[in-house]
Amino acid sequence: AQSVTQPDIHITVSEGASLELRCNYSYGATPYLFWYVQSPGQGLQLLLKYFSGDTLVQGIKGFEAEFKRSQSSFNLRKPSVHWSDAAVYLCAVVTTGGFKTIFGAGTRLFVKA
Amino acid sequence: GAGVSQSPSNKVTEKGKDVELRCDPISGHTALYWYRQSLGQGLEFLIYFQGNSAPDKSGLPSDRFSAERTGGSVSTLTIQRTQQEDSAVYLCASSPSSGVGYNEQFFGPGTRLTVL
């Protein structure tokens, strides 16, 4: 069965520091992968998505993610974190047929001054 | 333009009562999804609509849960005989289509359901 694992429940980084959030998926076919951010008062917003092609994808707000098939990973990165990035980040995979989305449990990011 | 809206934003009910949660998707979006997010948990897929049809109802937790969509637009999620474990935030999302394309889902603000 398809699954998404986000090993880190929460992460704390200093403002200006780099960030990497981990995501591992279990899926037999070519995955369709997404990262969403969930902020209080703003709901869920798509950061970026991977369907095919270049394994490094760019998203909004300076985020990027790299798809590594050999590691079944789709880690999210940002070179310099801003205080406004504090939120919950959710990794997701879309199953065959393109309608059922499996979400990870999320990683809560705390940013310290 | 208008995004996905959900009503009510908050609902407090007593155990055993029925509740209805409403979702208004973005106009023209043919695909509609319902998810449940329990405290500290990720999103749990409940059901998906393509138009008025629900090809996959496998995520509904029990037969107390049902959903319908009319006119290819508004959807209602109904929970009968609510239990305390039904307490969660119920999120609705819509997308222009499903299948090939794997479009972005646009999420509503959610309905927070509390069962006493």
Image (cartoon, coloured by chain):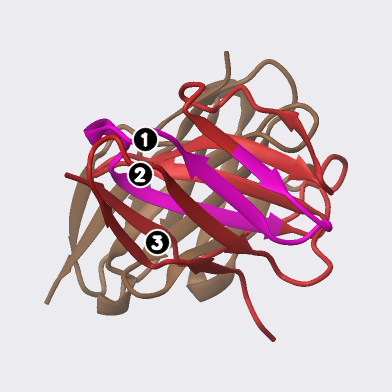
- The subunit carrying tag 1 is A
The image shows residue B61 at horizontal and vertical percentages of 46, 24
Q: Do labels 2 and 1 share a chain?
A: yes
The image shows residue B47 at horizontal and vertical percentages of 62, 36
Q: Is mark 3 on a helix, strand or loop?
A: strand
The image shows residue B66 at horizontal and vertical percentages of 57, 35
* Mark toward the start of the polypeptide (3 vs 1): 1
| Along the viewing direction, whichever of B73 and A59 lies nearer the viewer | B73
Q: Per the image, is B56 magenta?
A: no
The chain letter of the brown chain reads A
Q: Which amino acid does label 1 sit on?
A: Gln
When the figure is inspected, residue B33 is found, relative to residue A36, above or below; the finding is: above
Q: Is mark 1 on a helix, strand or loop?
A: loop
The chain letter of the red chain reads B
Q: Which amino acid does label 2 sit on?
A: Gly
Q: Label 2 crowding class (10 Å Cα cut-off): few <14, some 14-19, many 20+?
A: many
| Magenta region | B67-94
| Along the viewing direction, whichever of B86 and B38 lies nearer the viewer | B86
Reading the image, the residue beneath label 1 is A6
* Mark toward the start of the polypeptide (2 vs 3): 3
Q: Do the residues labelled 2 and 3 touch (CB within 8 Å)?
A: yes
- Is residue A78 among what the camera can see? no
- The subunit carrying tag 2 is A
Residue A38's disc is 3
- Is residue B57 among what the camera can see? yes
| Along the viewing direction, whichever of B23 and B20 lies nearer the viewer | B20
Question: Relative to residue A98, is residue A67 drawn left or right?
Answer: left
Q: Do the residues labelled 2 and 1 touch (CB within 8 Å)?
A: yes
